[in-house]
Image: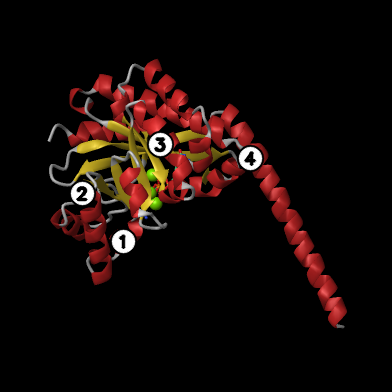
Amino acid sequence: RAKATGKSRYKVFSKKLHEMTHDALQLENDLKEAVEKNQLQLYYQPVVCAKSEKIKGFEALLRWSHPTRGMISPVNFIPLAEENGLIIPIGQWVIEEACRQLKKWHLSTEFARHMSMSVNISSRQFMHNDLEQTIINALDAVELSPDFFVAELTESSVMEKPESVIGQLNRLKKTGIRIAIDDFGTGYSSLAYLKRFPLDYLKMDKSFVDEINANHENMEIAKAIITLAHNLDLKVIAEGIERMEQLEALRCLDCNFIQGYYYSRPVDGLQASQLIEGWGDI
Ligand code: C2E
Ligand code: MG
Ligand code: MG
Ligand code: MG
């Protein structure tokens, strides 16, 4: 009896596994097509100065509008693209598209001319030796100065082998772009490396901001991250601010920039243009 149960369990398991594999393969093929068929799209979320409330710039966030599955979140396909290498052409397209969009805003609106564009770079993309050239080419193609470009690298992708990434970080930095550490606080950072890395921004992870008003420990962590960053001459961008009281708490702690639904969800290029217009030159 036990054996039969085991067998039928195995059958169910095997069927499930088969479906999953089939699903994953299908998704992989679809992703290849997505690049060619222009199903990938960038959304943009404003990064706002905590004091002046002016828009400092935007973060480009990738979206995949799948013909049958609808909008697929990057958390569900970036890992796949990392695995199969598609992240390289996809990442290149993201860099180029983000630069084109920023240039349009610079040209169309006088007070948008100071705005920057932040682009997420995955760890495989970061290790790929063409990255600097890809970024330089994209900036040159639209005649944008490199200091408008912010490369966001996650804490885990730079801290995994910190000694070997220093060279790559320095090469990136030499192009004149800015470098941000994304999701800061969720991994393990060596403070010694943090000091040696050529960084410009720390992006404090949403998890510390969520309960900043109710949870005393989160307030203390946020305070410690901001103090650390400022002592290292870095600016802090807080992620995931949804409520006014979070903004106020972060302002008191001298946080430099704010990003989150409180100001705007990520929106498509057209809506972001309208957002810029509506914001005005405050
Ligand atoms: P991330 O870079 O940390 O981006 C922040 C994520 O938080 C975004 O999710 C954004 O939509 C979301 N978010 C922003 N404000 C709020 C808020 O107030 N509340 C909540 N609940 N969420 C907020 P999204 O767009 O789904 O992106 C998820 C992750 O996927 C990104 O995290 C980034 O790691 C990755 N990603 C997105 N676009 C790209 C890309 O072009 N290339 C690569 N390599 N990774 C990307
Ligand atoms: Mg990011
Ligand atoms: Mg982040
Ligand atoms: Mg995050």
Q: Which residue is mark 4?
A: 84
Quadrant, the N terminus: bottom right
**Residue 184 appears left or right of 79:** left
Compare marks 4 and 1 and give the one earlier in the sequence.
4
Kind of element beneath mark 4: helix
Q: How is the image coloured?
A: secondary structure
Measure how far apart labels 4 and 1 are at the Cα level.
Answer: 33 Å
Q: What's the amino acid at mark 2?
A: His
- Residue 34 image position (x, y, % from top left): 58, 33
Q: Are marks 4 and 3 in contact (CB under 8 Å)?
A: no
In this view of the protein, which residue sits in the foreground, 280 or 130? 130
In this view of the protein, which residue sits in the foreground, 71 or 53? 53
**Residue 99 appears left or right of 91:** left
Q: What's the amino acid at mark 1?
A: Phe
Q: What's the amino acid at mark 4?
A: Asn
**Residue 185 appears left or right of 122:** left
Kind of element beneath mark 2: helix
Where is 253 relative to 113, above or below? below
Measure how far apart labels 2 and 1 are at the Cα level.
Answer: 17 Å
Kind of element beneath mark 3: helix
Compare marks 4 and 2 and give the one earlier in the sequence.
4
Q: Which residue is mark 3?
A: 169
Name the mark nearer the viewer: 4 or 3.
3
Where is 226 relative to 27, above or below? below
Q: Which residue is mark 1?
A: 208
- Res. 230 mark: 2
